[in-house]
Amino acid sequence: MLAKRFAFCFAAVGSAASVLTPRGGDTAVGNHWTDHDKVTPLPELPDDGLLGQLEKRFSPILYAYQGCIPYAAVNSDGYAGGGLRPTGDTGGDCRDFSQTGQLYATVGKSHGRWAVLYSYYLPKVHGPAEQHRHHWLSLVVWLSITKCPAKAENAKILATSFSTAPGEFVRRIDTIFTTALGGNSSGPRTHPVVRYDGGQPLLPSPFAPEALRFDDDPEVEVEEPPRRLAGAASGQTDPLAPPLVGWEKLPPLVKEQFNGIQYEHTKVPFSANNVQQYLDAAYADHIFSNSPIEYECQT
């Protein structure tokens, strides 16, 4: 139950796996490793009720220009992907667009403020600043409840925070938001458009089809991403929306692995021990300087 992790109110991938020899300082629960490309993603399964509605309504859309694209980190049997050594091309052996990847989501609070934490797993990072096996990218969408009843439609986007290192974030208010991929183009523009460019931190994307910027300024012109930017190694130009799975919907063995795995160079952002630390690090008072305390709604 979510109550085991947060007290919420509105207030003022299954396949057979092999055991791999651990490398470096990475330690998996039960030494349960498998090849990174053998981890079958879990099906789309947001959390129940309001939490899942928030996770889905504000889920990001990703342009992965260079480097790895997202992969599932742990399969349904609790075996973790073994990652890749940071050698060769920045996206070598980790830009297989036939696999869907995975988007991990959880809803929480920091300083009494609502947030949704989204995370992508990459088998390696190989850029000018970082080179190591296993990498996590995280995005926090900060929300304010504007009116009752307590439902996702009454949550207003205030800002986004992007991870720059494990447990470190930069706050941005220039994020573009768009409608859901494949959805109604006239629907709500609630999905942040983000980009990853081989070793750089996750950042807002300057491109998004038919999108408006954070302040809904109709004068802002938004362009399609040029083909030369969108993953030259693969020719992939489409934005990515991996199947989303909420923390409470993770199978027990998967949750156990996420709570116990120890990476040498990174951390699982949404594990039971890390999630509050990450949300607190992503928080900043100025995000809410003009926003009143949320409504207290009867749920």
Image: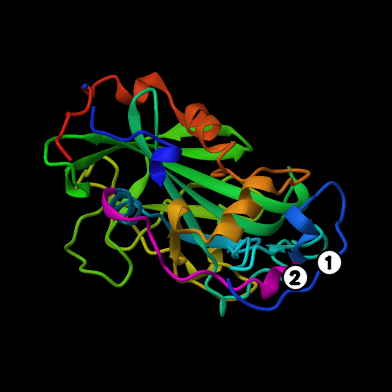
The answer to whether residue 126 is seen in the rendering is: no
**Front-lying residue, 64 or 118:** 118
The percent coordinates of residue 134 (x first, y second) are 71, 54
The answer to whether 106 is drawn above or below residue 224 in the figure is: above
Name the amino acid type tagged 1. Leu
| Residue highlighted by disc 2 | 35
Instruction: Identify which residue is drawn at 78% across, 50% down.
Output: 132
**Front-lying residue, 177 or 255:** 255
Instruction: Identify which residue is drawn at 59% across, 36% down.
Output: 273
| Residues at marks 1 and 2 touching, judged by CB atoms closer than 8 Å | yes
The answer to whether 17 is drawn above or below residue 65 in the figure is: below
On the picture, is 80 further left or further right than 264? left
The percent coordinates of residue 282 (x first, y second) are 48, 31
On the picture, is 172 further left or further right than 188? right
Q: Which mark is residue 20?
A: 1
The answer to whether 89 is drawn above or below residue 248 in the figure is: below
Taking the magenta stretch, the answer to whether it contains residue 45 is yes
Q: Which residues are magenta?
A: 34-50
Taking the magenta stretch, the answer to whether it contains residue 274 is no
Instruction: Identify which residue is drawn at 38% across, 59% down.
Output: 46
Element at badge 2?
Answer: loop
Element at badge 1?
Answer: loop
Q: Which mark is residue 136?
A: none
Instruction: Identify which residue is drawn at 50% across, 58% down.
Output: 250
**Front-lying residue, 13 or 88:** 13
Name the amino acid type tagged 2. Asp
Near mark 1 (Cα within 10 A), the count class, few <14, some 14-19 or many ≥20, is some
Q: Residue 12 sits in which quadrant? A: top left
Q: Residue 39 sits in which quadrant? A: bottom right
Measure the C-alpha gap from mark 1 to mark 2.
8 Å
Which of the marked residues, 1 or 2, is nearer the chain's N terminus? 1
